[in-house]
Amino acid sequence: MSKQPKYRQVADALRREISDGKYPPGSRLPSENDLTERFSASRNTVRSGLMQLVSEGLISSSQGLGYEVRSHEVFELNASRFENLSFPQQGDAFNTDVRNAGRRPHQTFRVELKPAPPEVAERLKVESGSTTVLRFCHRFVDDVPWSTQATYYPEWLVNEAPRLTEPGDIAEGTTRYLAGLGVEQGGYFDEIATRMPTPDEARLLEMGAGVPVLLWTRTGYAADRPIRCTLTTLRGDLNRMNYEVSALANRDEGQ
């Protein structure tokens, strides 16, 4: 006899069945009444087991509709090619990558003058609290909230590139716009981390309980100094990132 609490036995059994494909993404689980009978358990015990799976991000619950296995239509981002001007783009890098994947991109913008947060100032090598331009994007793939992106530009750069303060999208992408002015991003430094979302992040990305966020910080450098710091917050259940460290022709042939 299992020494696991009954609600964990319920969660473990359903988790296995989801993993084995008995309940595929988008399908509904049996009702609480049916599960109560199946596991010879109280409704509260069954509900605790189901909430365990909700907290893990495996299922979602809707008032009056029961429990549904989450669909995870993952978008794969090649972070090496993202914003790389040697690859052809139709507009900015996000729109290009999403369209190339056969998906439909959409994004909204907000532009503000903001004091540089300490962690941003450190990366941009400017004084903490000095003026930056923040370009904030709320991004969607097929109308599903996918990520937010906050890019900070130092004040000295804005003086050379005034379109950075425009409230809408820069059609050719900011990296290509800056390169056209002679401010070319010659390299970048990436930092990757994960954590659970803040309430505001969960609201913007419409995330259920138990789903973490992937935090991607990219600091872009021109020849002599940093030119921007981008903080991207991605839904952990809908995104996967990869990098290519060299020209991998043999990998492309194998794919």
Image (cartoon, grey):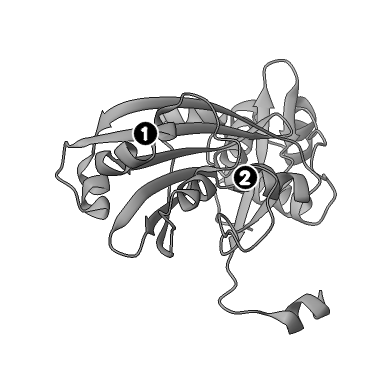
Residue at the spot of label 2:
94
Nearer to us in this view, 181 or 41:
181
Q: Earlier in the sequence, mark 2 or mark 1?
A: 2
Horizontal and vertical percent for residue 15?
Answer: 69, 50
Horizontal and vertical percent for residue 1?
Answer: 64, 58
Residue flagged by tag 2: what amino acid is it?
Phe
Does any portion of residue 208 appear in the rendered image? no
Residue at the spot of label 1:
134
Query: Quadrant location of residue 107?
Result: top right
What element does badge 1 sit on?
strand
Residue drawn 65% across the image and 51% down it: 12
Left or right: where 89 falls relative to 3: right
Nearer to us in this view, 94 or 231:
94
Q: Quadrant of the C terminus?
A: bottom right
* Badge 2 density bin: few <14, some 14–19, many ≥20, Cα 10 Å: many
Nearer to us in this view, 46 or 76:
76
Q: CA distance from mark 2 to mark 1?
A: 18 Å
Residue drawn 68% across the image and 80% down it: 248
Horizontal and vertical percent for residue 9?
Answer: 63, 49
Residue drawn 64% across the image and 36% down it: 50
Residue flagged by tag 1: what amino acid is it?
Leu
As drawn, the residue found furthest toward the front would be 181
As drawn, the residue found furthest toward the right would be 22
Query: Quadrant location of residue 242?
Result: bottom right
Nearer to us in this view, 185 or 62:
185
Horizontal and vertical percent for residue 25?
Answer: 79, 43
